[in-house]
Amino acid sequence: MKRWLISVLILACFPALAVEPVTVVTYADIAVYLDRQAAAQVESLDEARLSAQVSATVQRIPVRPGQTVAAGELLLELDPADFQIQVNAARARLEGADAALDMARLRVERARRLAPQNFVSEDQLLEAETRYRQAQAEHEGARQELISAELALDRTRIIAPFAAVLTERLIGVGALAAPGTPLLELVAVDELEVVAGISPEMADGLTAAESVHFESGGRSEPVALLRLAPVLTRGGRNRQARLGFVAASLPAGSEGRIRWTDPRPSLPAQFIVQRHGQLGVMLLADDGSAEFLPLPEADAGRPHLLDLPGDTQLIDDGRRRVSPGQRVRIR
């Protein structure tokens, strides 16, 4: 009787010595893999507002808003009459410069042949060579004027720089377009990316995910991670992720969500307990006692990413009763 009373008193004074019956599970058996999601939208890499580079009247706009155009297709034409005149005049000046250059070349060649026999003075040879160089410079100037005039003429035709959809016409036929006047707006149809803001704690899981899908308007399309910015955005404090469509794409401007499964194991919320004001998980130590592993970044009621060996033993039934260091009996 005295031994029994002594044992009761010892256990009452030192509860850590009491053997608590518990059950244990391995981390591999209870780990969960979280489904993740983030708001996202489809953006076009190429969006352009085309402007006039020369001053002329709008003569023709063969495309309509909402129409898909190919790269190199004519979108708008300005009145080319004045610029064609400039091209014709520049060509005429170049032809005159050609003739003057040919004459100067013949004269300098003749002077060089006659100079050794003293039929041409040194001053006459120098004058012929000077006129030849002047003719060369005038010819080059006329050639550059023609190039400039032809470039201005080419600028009366506004060509699609890439395959796109014409989203807006900003000017009408008959209006005068000055340099810098916005004419048309285009959005590329091929260069599309899905853009999403990813919180830092989800970034590694997205990088390692086997598959990611973009969901919008009842559709779900597979996407692949292209780039994950190494810096945080100023407003949302997220990392910007850019993903590309694997097969079919959705139109630019589509809003939805990207979804993926984080391949990193997480501790289920019910295994997170509190001891001495700290959150953590109760493990079975090698010596058969309960061991408390603090989880400083854990949140009560939420699964917690935890990198543990799969054969780590966690206390299941009895985890809320045992104390750190207390002997336990597996039942």
Image (cartoon, helix red, strand yellow):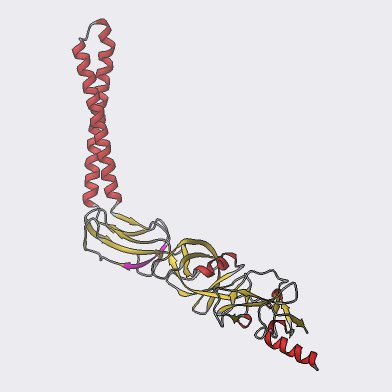
Residue 104, percent across and down? 24, 22
Can residue 57 be seen here? The reply is: yes
- Left or right, 134 with respect to 284, comes to left
Number of dots carrying numbers: 0
**Main secondary-structure element of the magenta-colored stretch:** strand
Q: Quadrant of the C terminus?
A: bottom right
* Residue at x-position 73% and y-position 71%: 311
Which residues make up the magenta segment? Answer: 164-168
Residue reaching furthest to the front: 2
Residue reaching furthest to the bottom: 1
- Left or right, 231 with respect to 149, comes to right
Residue 150, percent across and down? 28, 45
- Residue 230 lies in the magenta-colored region: no
Q: Nearer the viewer, residue 176 or 89?
A: 176
Residue 114, percent across and down? 26, 10
- Residue 165 lies in the magenta-colored region: yes
* Residue at x-position 72% and y-position 73%: 285
Residue reaching furthest to the top: 117
* Residue at x-position 26% and y-position 53%: 53
- Left or right, 309 with respect to 218, comes to right
Residue 78, percent across and down? 26, 57
Q: Nearer the viewer, residue 196 or 250?
A: 196
Q: Quadrant of residue 179?
A: bottom left
Q: Nearer the viewer, residue 266 or 313?
A: 313
* Residue at x-position 53% and y-position 70%: 202
Above/below status of 288 relative to 331:
above
